[in-house]
Amino acid sequence: MKKTLAILLTLAMVLSVAACGAQPSETPDTPDSTQTQTQTKAPEATPAQGEAEPPVAAVEGLTDLNTYETKARELETWNIHYSQAAADLNVLCNLIDGLLTNDNHGNLKLNAAKSYESPDGGKTWVFTLNEGMTWFNKDGEVQADVLASDWATGLEWVLNYAKNDSYNVSMPAEMIAGANEYYEYTKELTESEGAEAVKALTADEGSKFAEMVGIEVDDDAGTITYTLVDQLPYFPSVATYNCLYPLSIDLIEELGVDGYRDVTWENMWYSGPYTISYYEYQNQKVFTKSPDYWNDANCKRFDTVTVKMVESASVAFQLFKNGELDHVSLDQATLQGIYNGTSDAELKENLVEARPTKYSYQIHLVYSKNLVDSEDPDTNWNTAVANENFRKSLYYGLDLTNYFARTNAINPLSCQNFVYTGNGVAFTSDGTDYTQLVLDELGLDYDYTKYARVDADKAAEYKAKAIEELTAKGVTFPVTIDYFISGSSDVAAQTAKVLEDIFATCLGSDYVVLKTNTYVSSLANEVRKPRKAAIYINGWGADFADPINFLGQETYNDSAAYYSNAYSNCNDNDDPDLIAAYQEFTDLVTAAKAITNDMDARYAAFAKAEACMLNHALVIPCSYEVGWELTKINNYSKVYSMYGMQAYRYVDWETSVTPYTTEQMNENAAAYAAE
Amino acid sequence: MIKYIIKRLFQSVLVILLVVCVVFSLLRLMPSDYFFTEDELIKFTEAQKYAKLERLGLMKICPTCEGTGIVNDEACHDCRENELAAKGTGYVTRSTLAQLGDFFRDMLQVRVFNAKGKEVKSIEPLTLFSYLSQKMKTGENPFGELKEGQYTRLMFNMGKSIRLEKNQYVTDVIASKMSVSMKIGLLSLAVSLVLGVVLGVLQARFKDKLFDHIGTGYTIIVKAVPPLVVYTIIMIVGASLFNLPMRYDATAAKPWLTVVLPVICLSVASTAGYMLWTRRYMVDELNKDYIRLAKLKGLSDRKVMFRHVLKNAFVPLAQYLPYSILLTVGGSLLVETFFAVPGMGPELTTAISRYDLNLVQGIVLLYATMGIFGVFLGDLLMTLIDPRIKLTGKGDVR
């Protein structure tokens, strides 16, 4: 009896505890493959006898794309208004259509808007919507029409302090008339009336929002009219960004304000080229072609796109070799193995150099730093970095070629970057890239055979001057440069070792010593806030197509300048020469910003300001990210925008069922250049 | 026996409660900055930070100034940050005890689902207490009349994930991951138990022969080589020779095929463990007098090995069996990360590194419960296999 009882009890307990976790997992919603294939399969065309082989771009491509992200880049929210993270926006830009998007050359391209114009030279912008656009759920069931008023609802959400926690406020607040006032109004109202009262605000006719903010919508005509604070000719590029994305009032009514903030892939509404048919956190997302998509006739889409989360680049490489991925970016060891023929040599003919990402990397100097092990100021460093000769010795002395080789072991100089603003952000009326204007001002030129900025003689000259001036101010040498990396990253540790060697070799360990420190998990909490680091190497990608988006982050005594406040702390160093240099740069930026009726003059003025910043070596330009990859995707067919959030839109991509060879990709590049 | 079980159950619950209180309090000792993302720290105003901390239950609106920061035209004394502040923050910190009280108060929750099993009302957690009190007062369902097909469920509530799976219930996150981990874990446990015990018996049977040496070699290699190296070899061999999928994929045409490599990787080490211990306990038993007697009485080797030696040698192994079964809930950090299995394995470390407090609490509570009940059930199982073992009073000497 006792034995039976014990057996039953044990079994019952094991099973009951185990059963808690053994919920049947939901069957993933798989697309109706028969239907989607019928809809999208291109007519099979066989070249006739004697006909020339089709060009590479016309190769029959993939109908289902398998791509990947590493685990650190998992999406955090499905709410497109509530995010500024690339990991989120790379997904969400496929699910909801904004007014405009970009093409493969970075030009603006019509999307939800069928036309846009400014009747007054850039202060008012009118967008007219396409007809027949709808909101649908993940199963493709139509929920509502996409209306012009959805853009007003979206903007109200972004500007409402109690709804969106200030995400994405800065751009509309700076550009749209009354937007900042409305944001401040909701903020004050939250404090006086409480959050619930503010959450109840809407963008309806007669509302406070409609009264205050420069947006007018006409659902019947399908027009959205933005009135800006000034003439802003670059405003249409902001229309590609999520701060100006639509939101249906019906969805808010269905989910509630808190419900929409916490929206998931299962209850969100879609209006873009894809819906999500399966999502498992840290495993994979499956995008499925939206049925009855309004723009189906004018765009090429995959039947499905599967984004697989992988543990590391080396696992991704194994998956690519096994045919489970359609492209892979190569880490240094794998790339060198293939290139040198020591491993997987058969893949050498498929090695393809990637196009630069939109991020322009800089060495940010910190002008007000504390000691690593106390809260006292690091006077030695703060005094040294305020000295222009010291900064210029770094600017001219550091040959970062070996550092670039960590990203691009074959052509490291492809990564070199001499200016602050990223390439391809803005162009003059004759098509000249804005960065060329800066290079002209600096007297430099891109040349991939040598590192044009490095000048050992100049560096030695500035070093001698700096030693003399700084010794008089009591600075002791070598000056320690505290640099921080994540303690859990072997890759970062190896890269930091390379940097240490560069500093020692180029400038001498009697002059400066780069000291690598580690943080546990939060750079902001452990390093940036307590001001422990002397330099940061950071990349900045533009949100819209104007140099102010870059230069505005570095201005002096400006609460909106991200890098000045969060990284360099330049406002807290009282060295008069440094302040004068910053002030000169800031004045030039302010003057350039004021030019709104002549874009060429505006860019020329910005170029002058940027050259001033670099001539004072307030920031040291570092690199672009240009790696190598194996891919079945024609890189030159993808959306290629150096600003905004459209780069991962899986529309109009050309692919090949086998990996492109180096030669084929070069042909693609040549064809692209000739377009 | 029943008295003993009730006593142990009561003790277990007490220990679990203690663990919850300690973990909860420790997590609340962290500086409040850790509740914000890097972006939020830069962009948020102080007022926004306070508002978020209030939403998370760490702060509350100052009762003195009712959130205005001003009392009688002066800065509120209860919420101003320093003597010179012209205005208070409008928020005061809540005591850990009050927060702990909320945690236990809200631990059970009623949720409404539709016919498809999707939650219909989940915006504000409705505690069991308020649900019952309202129902008793008015006799009405606090959710209003349920539509056709809708139903309510009484469920555990440990809050919502604040970072990893933003605003999803911790219980839902854990449940979905547990099922995946258990599926793979139980499969691998079955494989390793059968293989490990059988091979261990054979090693003991052919002690100091070639088979024993091969088995010992295997055990040593598996224990000595770093797991990631073993997994990489298994992955490459499995994928290139047998064309097995290299990562878990529930949407694959043959989903079961995608669990083969993770199961093999999980089984490799535990099979070696079962082999090692089965061999060791069996060799011990083989040298005992009752075995010699059995052999002298003419029992066949097979009967001696399986009917007498294995039965007794399995007792110490059996103690850990329930624990091992329950441990499958926790998954494997390395294997699940390596094969992108969306299970429990990496969840705790990721939740800690991203400061997802509610998720950390939920997972720790789960692990503590599993650990405590695993040992308890192991003790019960031992008494079944070996009746000489008594959990109460003095037992016989083995």
Image: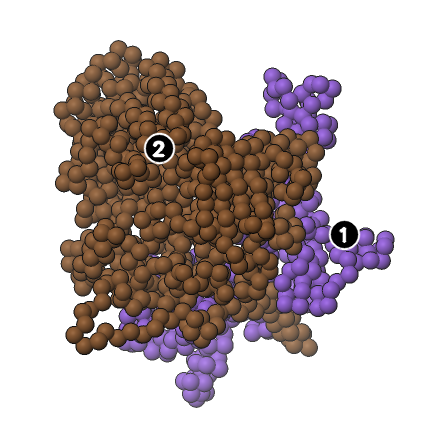
The crowd level at tag 2 (other Cα within 10 Å; few <14, some 14-19, many 20+) is some
Q: Residue at horizontal 63%, vertical 67%? A: B116
Q: Say left or right for B14 vs B128.
A: left
Q: Residue furthest top?
A: A472
Q: Is residue B353 visible in the rendered structure shown here?
A: no
* Residue B84 occupies quadrant: top right
Instruction: Say how the picture is coloured.
Output: by chain
Which mark is in front, 2 or 1?
Answer: 2
Front position in the image: A477 or A341: A341
**Residue A658, percent from left and from top:** 26, 66
Name the residue beneath numbered marker 2. A599
Q: Is residue A458 visible in the rendered structure shown here?
A: yes
**Residue A177, percent from left and from top:** 54, 33
The three-letter code of the residue at mark 2 reads: Met
Residue B336 marker: none
* Residue A4 occupies quadrant: bottom right
Where the N terminus of chain A falls, by quadrant? Answer: bottom right
Number of marks in the rendered image:
2
Q: Residue furthest front?
A: A119
Please give the chain letter of the residue carrying mark 1: B
Q: Say left or right for B62 vs B337.
A: right
Front position in the image: A341 or A496: A341
Establish if B276 lies above or below A448: below
Q: Which chain is brown?
A: A
Q: Which chain is purple?
A: B
The three-letter code of the residue at mark 1 reads: Phe
Name the residue beneath numbered marker 1. B129
| Secondary element at tag 1 | helix
**Residue A457, percent from left and from top:** 13, 24
